[in-house]
Amino acid sequence: MRAHVWRHHREDHGGLISDALRRHGVEVEEYLVGPFSSPPVDDASDFLVVLGSSESVYDPTISWISQELQEMQRLLERGVRVLGICFGAQMLCVLHGGRVEKAPIGELGWYDVQSKTPQIAQGPWFQYHYDRCELPARAEILAHSEIAVQAFTIGRHVGVQFHPEVDAAQLRDWFAHDADARRSGADIDEFIRTAMAREVELKTNADQLVEFYLSR
């Protein structure tokens, strides 16, 4: 079994999700896409994981988004199973007839979610978003917060608004490149300390999510 992971920033990692896929016997290949390169055309993969982006899926001025949506649609039609994370979940939502809108407030930091199923842990999960999904009727909501849908399925596909791939190394890399977040007063050191202190729990939660995704 093979999975492709699409990254939209040089500082992005497949992190705990790529690690969990490998532990389940899946060969993982990560690709830097979006503004850097077109998604690879490869019909040998079984799974697609799409990570977050600082862009909004509904922004018509970002030329690469439509191309990436088209390639995801092609893979969906071929039967590739998608795990969409943050921006990736929003792509999944749009391609199935939903819409994405700006959230009333953003979520940045560690949050618990209200989960309807044991396959999605309550958290804490790291949130880093300013948009939210308005899901199509056929979607099933698995978890939510006061601000946004946090986990859902559409057929065999899974979308999550939070970032299950995140570990301390990912947070260090993200915030080293995000001057706006550093200026916002966000307690980045505390974010990283929490990731280090809850390392085992984060790994367990990511493993559980991946097992659920692969079993669909």
Image (cartoon, grey):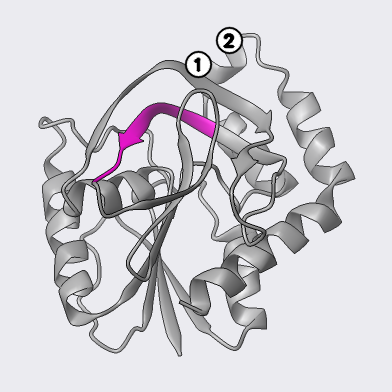
Distance, label 1 to label 2, CA atoms, is 5 Å
x, y percentage for residue 114? Answer: 62, 38
Q: Is residue 129 magenta?
A: yes
Horizontal relation, residue 141 to residue 40: left or right: right
x, y percentage for residue 69? Answer: 17, 54
x, y percentage for residue 107? Answer: 54, 24
Q: Amino acid at mark 2?
A: Arg
Q: Which residue is at 84% across, 44% downward?
A: 196
Dominant secondary structure, magenta: strand
Q: Is residue 16 magenta?
A: no
Residue 179 visible in the snapshot: no
- Could you tell me which secondary element the residue under label 2 belongs to? helix
Q: Residues within 10 Å of mark 1 (few under 14, many from 20)?
A: few
Quarter of the rendering occupied by the N terminus: bottom left
Horizontal relation, residue 122 to residue 30: left or right: right
x, y percentage for residue 42? Answer: 24, 82
Q: Which residue is at 75% across, 53% downward?
A: 202
Position above or below: 44 against 23: below
Position above or below: 32 against 52: below
Pointer 2 residue:
183
Q: Residues within 10 Å of mark 2 (few under 14, many from 20)?
A: few
Pointer 1 residue:
180
Q: Which residue is at 11% across, 30% downward?
A: 61
- Could you tell me which secondary element the residue under label 1 belongs to? helix
Q: Which residues are magenta?
A: 128-136
Q: Are marks 1 and 2 in contact (CB under 8 Å)?
A: yes
